[in-house]
Image (cartoon, grey):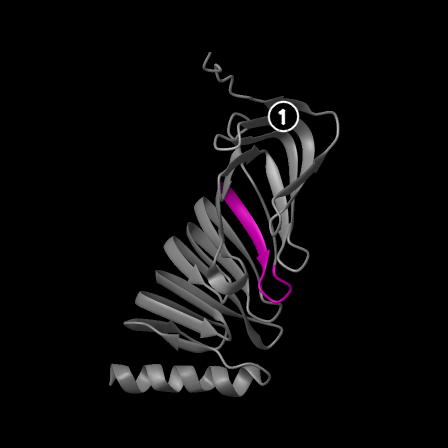
Amino acid sequence: MKKVFIMIFILSFVIISYSSTIHVSADTVKGGDEFYVLKNNVQVIKGTLEVLTDLATVTLVNDEWRKLASEGGIKIKTDTMEATAVSLEYDLKKDTGLLEGNVETVIILENNDKKIYIYCDEINFDNKNKTYSGKMNSEKELVKIIKDDYLIFSRSFEYDENTKILVLNNNVKITNPEKKIDMETTKATFKTDKNEISANKVKLTLEIEDKEENK
């Protein structure tokens, strides 16, 4: 009886959403005309988006199944991004979302050869346009970003997969132990395809190893 009910629930999404198909599965489903609460082994798929969690709510907005909310721990995956967080709010029509709470994000660059690792309190992301913006909520903590040998810190950031430009704002610190680079500034841009840095009013330290010549 449970399986039949879930199949009817999935079918209702296909009919109501018209332009997009949303596939939903869960161990238990409760709701009515305006919302459904999904519990245990929840999976929501729309296009390239996949959300895994144990508790989620799908809500009707302007006669469309549009709002997806999840809390208590979620995993999310798209064609170019994977992330974990405590909670998620997602607009199923606009393909935009907000991840909050111990957010750990991996953005996969071209050909899966390179990745960007981001650790912060919250990230707004646009899955359709492939843009991201995030920050730390505590004034004492900074966003941590890892790209190749570069270790980057800042209060907030913006990233566009199309331009491959990472914008870093406030308390920016960029280090590379391998290349012996240590940079501090208030704002910088980082081209992720070429590892090129651009900034103003910079404090920069470049280390050079002194080697004794054999006499």
Residue 125 painted magenta: yes
Q: Quadrant of residue 129?
A: bottom right
In the depicted view, which residue is nearer to us: 172 or 100?
172
- Indicate the amino acid at tag 1: Glu
Circle 1 residues within 10 Å: few <14, some 14–19, many ≥20: many
Q: How many marks are shown on the rendered structure?
A: 1
Farthest residue toward the left? 1
Instruction: State the residue in front, 27 or 77.
Output: 77
At x 54%, y 62%, the residue is: 110
Q: Quadrant of the N terminus?
A: bottom left
Label 1 SS:
strand
**Residue located at (66% from left, 36% from top):** 169
Q: Can you tell which quarter of the image residue 131 is in?
A: bottom right
Q: Kindly identify which residue carries mark 1.
A: 184
Q: Position of residue 63 (x, y in %)?
A: 59, 77
Q: Give the residue at the far front of this rendering.
A: 215
The answer to whether residue 214 is above or below residue 170 is above
In the current view of this chain or complex, which residue is farthest to the top? 215
- Looking at the image, is 209 positioned above or below residue 45? above
Could you say where residue 42 lies in the image, as x and y percent from the top left?
34, 67
- Residue 117 in the image: above or below residue 139: below
Magenta stretch holds residue 170: no
Query: Quick check: 55 left or right of 198?
Result: left
Q: Nearer the viewer, residue 24 or 196?
A: 196
Residue 11, position in %: x, y? 43, 87
Dominant SS type (magenta): strand
Q: Residue at x 63, y 25 (%)?
A: 184
Query: In the figure, is residue 115 to the left or right of 42?
Result: right
Q: In the image, which residues are magenta?
A: 120-130
- Please state the horizontal and vertical placement of residue 54, each as a whole percent of the image: 32, 61
Give me the residue at 43% from left, 47% from top.
104
